[in-house]
Image: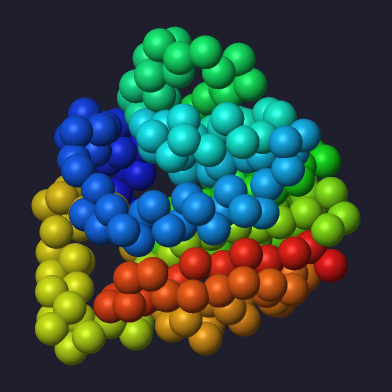
C-alpha cells in the first residue's frame, strides 16, 4: 500500500504551484462556505494542503485551524501565514482523524477534496460529529467518481497502475447518493448541497449536526 504521508510530502511543492483548475467553481465554494460562518466561529479544516483556502476563509471567523497529513504541505502553509496579519490562523501536521480528535467544541469542520482519499470515511464523519458543538456544521466538497462520465471512468481505470508506480494516492469511488447517505448516517442533516463541477460530480454539502 502507498505510504500516504510520503506521497503527499513529495507532491507538496508541485501542489503548491499548480493552478486551480476551475476557478469559477472554487470561488463559488468559498462564497457559499463564508455565508455559513459567523465572526466568532472556531473552524477546523482537515486536509488543508498548503493553506490557500484557509488564508481566504480565516478572515471571516474567530479561529481557524488547518491540518494535513503532509508536514511538507504544512511547512508551506506556515510560510504563507507568516507573511500575513492573521493571528487567528494555525496549521498542524496530522492525519485527518488525529486532526479532528485534537479539537472539540467546533462550529464547523471543513473537508475540501479530501474524503475520497481516506480509507475510512465513516470514521472521519463520526469524529467530525463528535468534535462539533450541537448544531455545528460539516462543510465538504468531494468528487463522487462512481457518477463520472464513461470517458472519465476509462481514465480512472489507470489509477491502480499509477498507484503501483507511486504516482497516485489511495482513492475511493462512490456515488453522490452513497456519499449523502454516509453523511446522514453519521448524524447530520444536509441543509445545502450541489454538484460543482458536474462531471465528475464534485459534491458540495453543508450538513448540520443533529
* Residue at position x 68%, y 29% in the image: 63
Is residue 170 in sight in this rendering?
no
The colour scheme applied to this rendered structure is rainbow
Task: Give the x, y percent position of residue 85.
Answer: 52, 13
Q: As rendered, which of 18 and 151 lies closer to the eye?
A: 18
Q: As rendered, which of 43 and 29 lies closer to the eye?
A: 29
Task: Give the x, y percent position of residue 192.
Answer: 62, 72
* Residue at position x 66%, y 54% in the image: 36
Quarter of the C terminus within the rendering: bottom right
Left or right? Give the position of 97 relative to 116.
right
Q: As rendered, which of 170 and 108 lies closer to the eye?
A: 108
Q: How many marks?
A: 0
Q: Image quadrant of residue 190?
A: bottom right
Task: Give the x, y percent position of residue 93.
Answer: 49, 28
Is residue 116 in sight in this rendering?
yes
Q: Is residue 50 above or below residue 89?
A: below
Residue found at the far right of this picture: 134
Task: Give the x, y percent position of residue 147.
Answer: 34, 85
Q: Is residue 4 above or below residue 118?
A: above
Left or right? Give the position of 138 relative to 66.
right
Left or right? Give the position of 35 relative to 187.
left
* Residue at position x 28%, y 78% in the image: 199
Amino acid at each position: 500500500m502507498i505510504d500516504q504521508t510520503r506521497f503527499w510530502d513529495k507532491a507538496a511543492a508541485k501542489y503548491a504551484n499548480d493552478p486551480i483548475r476551475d476557478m469559477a467553481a472554487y470561488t463559488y465554494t468559498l462564497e457559499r462556505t463564508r455565508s455559513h460562518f459567523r465572526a466568532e466561529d472556531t473552524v477546523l479544516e482537515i486536509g488543508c494542503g498548503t493553506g490557500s483556502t484557509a488564508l481566504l476563509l480565516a478572515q471571516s471567523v474567530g479561529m481557524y485551524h488547518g491540518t494535513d497529513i503532509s508536514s511538507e504541505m504544512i511547512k508551506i502553509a506556515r510560510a504563507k501565514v507568516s507573511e500575513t496579519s492573521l493571528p487567528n490562523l494555525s496549521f498542524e501536521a496530522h492525519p485527518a482523524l488525529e486532526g479532528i480528535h485534537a479539537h472539540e467544541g467546533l462550529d464547523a469542520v471543513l473537508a475540501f477534496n479530501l474524503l475520497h482519499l481516506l480509507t475510512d470515511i465513516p470514521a472521519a464523519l463520526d469524529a467530525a460529529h463528535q468534535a462539533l458543538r450541537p448544531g455545528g456544521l460539516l462543510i465538504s466538497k468531494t468528487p463522487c467518481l462512481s457518477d463520472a462520465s464513461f470517458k472519465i471512468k476509462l481514465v480512472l481505470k489507470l489509477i491502480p497502475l499509477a498507484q503501483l508506480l507511486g504516482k497516485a494516492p489511495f482513492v475511493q469511488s462512490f456515488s453522490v447518493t452513497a456519499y449523502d447517505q454516509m453523511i446522514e448516517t453519521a448524524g447530520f442533516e444536509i441543509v445545502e448541497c450541489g454538484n460543482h463541477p458536474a462531471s465528475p460530480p464534485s459534491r458540495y454539502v453543508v450538513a448540520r449536526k443533529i
